[in-house]
Structures are given as structure tokens and as C-alpha cells.
Image: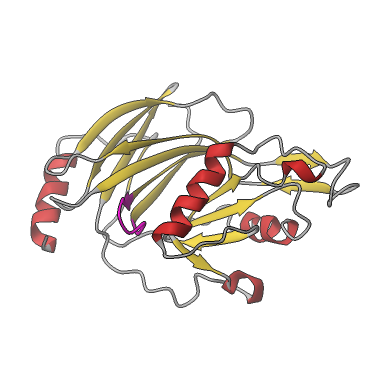
Amino acid sequence: MSAKPLLALTAALFAGTAAADCTVSSGPTQTPLVELYTSEGCSSCPPADRWLSRLTGAKDTVALAFHVDYWDYIGWKDRFAEPRNGQRQRDKVALAGGRTVYTPQIMVNGRDSRAWRGGDPLAGLARGSAQAQIRLTSDGDTVRVQASAPAGRSARLVIARYENGHQSVVKAGENSGATLDHDFVVRDWETHPMPTDTPLNTDIHLRAPEKPGGVAAFVEDMHSGDVLQALALPDCRG
């Protein structure tokens, strides 16, 4: 699909919607999505956790930390881990042609990136034109989502509630005795298939937050795993 039809679709999607303090809209340039797959039971994960925390306050990047449960058996149960987080990681790795999951793993726009160990994996990242558009509005416990993707493309919207400022004192396992700090912790998330020829408009109810954070949403290709656009809405009380 050419850029002009997508822009026309976007204009139709967002036309007539009044601006609000608790509303954010994606722009014409793609915003990078950084996903960290981590575990409190993994001794090599704390440096990646700290690296991700450096993105706090960044307005041009969306960051999320998915805690996985497949290391729980070695002595420490990660309280933020869910089986589906690990399944998402396995699915993303498979879509990219890989076979092995590991922690800590950082993905940028759906692709494995190990550059964080030596600096900034976002440095030099080409930020092309967005292939999807997203608008988020917070209304109490409800998040109103409007999103568009190129017609005919198999895409889905993923929306997640994340929290910052979590701290855990680990009493067993590889990190026994350590105090771990976590930001961008995914506490709840949903996926919604995108219509192939019309925008997505839906109201979503995610779990109530325990810590400050926000909501992040992104549109990804269901076949390739490529991220088409990402957007974050920090906590808002309209």
C-alpha cells in the first residue's frame, strides 16, 4: 500500500477527535519498540535491567520488560513472570528464524539486538516513515484505542500496562542476596487482530496499576514480527 492511502486512512481515523491531556497520537516517523526478556532468577539479567531503566523519560522510544518464568525452577520464582511472556518470546524468535530463547534478550522492533552490551542499540537506527498509526486515550480505568495499518496487511495490536519503580530482594537462586530494581515491567497485556480494511476502534480494560507507569501499544506484522509503530501513554488522570 502506498503512503498516500495510509495517510488518508489515518486522517479519517483521527478526524474530529478533540485533543485531551490524556490522549497521545503517534507521528509520521516510526517510534522504536524495545522489548527486554528478563528474569530475577538470571544472574546475567541485572545489567540489562539497569540498561533498560536508562530509557525512563525517553520520549522517542517505547520500552517494555517481559519477565519470563522458565528460570523459576533454579531457586527463585520471579513474581512478575508469566508463562505467556516466555511464549511471546519463543514466537518472536521463531518468526525471526531463530530457535533458541535466552535471557537477557533485547529486541528492537521485533529483532534480536545485542548492541546494548556495548552501548546504545538505537544509535544509528534508521527511523523511517511509520507504517501504522495509533491513538491512545485514558479515561479512568479504560484505555480507548484507535489504530490503523496498511489495508490487506495481517497485523495485530498489542497493548500492555507497564510499571516503574519496582524493587525485589532476592533470597535464593543465582541472584541470592541482591536487590533488583525494575522499570517498564509488563503487568498485563492483550492482543487484538487488526481489521484488514478498516481502522481498529476499541475500549480496553487492563489491570489497575500498583506502581507508576503507563500504557504502551504497538502494531506488529503477524507473519514477520516486524513492528510497524509503537506509542506510550504515561499514567494520566484526566
Residue at 36% from the left image edge and 56% from the top image edge: 225
Query: Front-most of 164 and 98?
Result: 98
**Residue 20 quadrant:** top left
User: Residue at the spot x=41%, y=39% of the render?
Assistant: 159
Query: Quadrant where the C terminus lies?
Result: top left
Image coords of residue 23 (percent x, y): 35, 37
Question: Which range is magenta?
Answer: 220-227
Find the residue positioned furthest to the front.
Answer: 99
Q: Residue at x 9, y 60 (%)?
A: 4
> Relative to residue 70, is residue 197 drawn left or right?
left
Residue 82: % across, % down = 60, 36
Residue 197 x, y percent position in the rendering: 11, 43
- What secondary structure is the magenta-colored segment mainly? loop
Q: Is residue 225 magenta?
A: yes
Comparing 144 with 220, the one in front is 220
Q: Quadrant of the N terminus?
A: bottom left
Q: Is residue 23 magenta?
A: no
* Residue 228 picture quarter: bottom left
Count of numbered circles on the image: 0
Q: Quadrant of residue 21?
A: top left
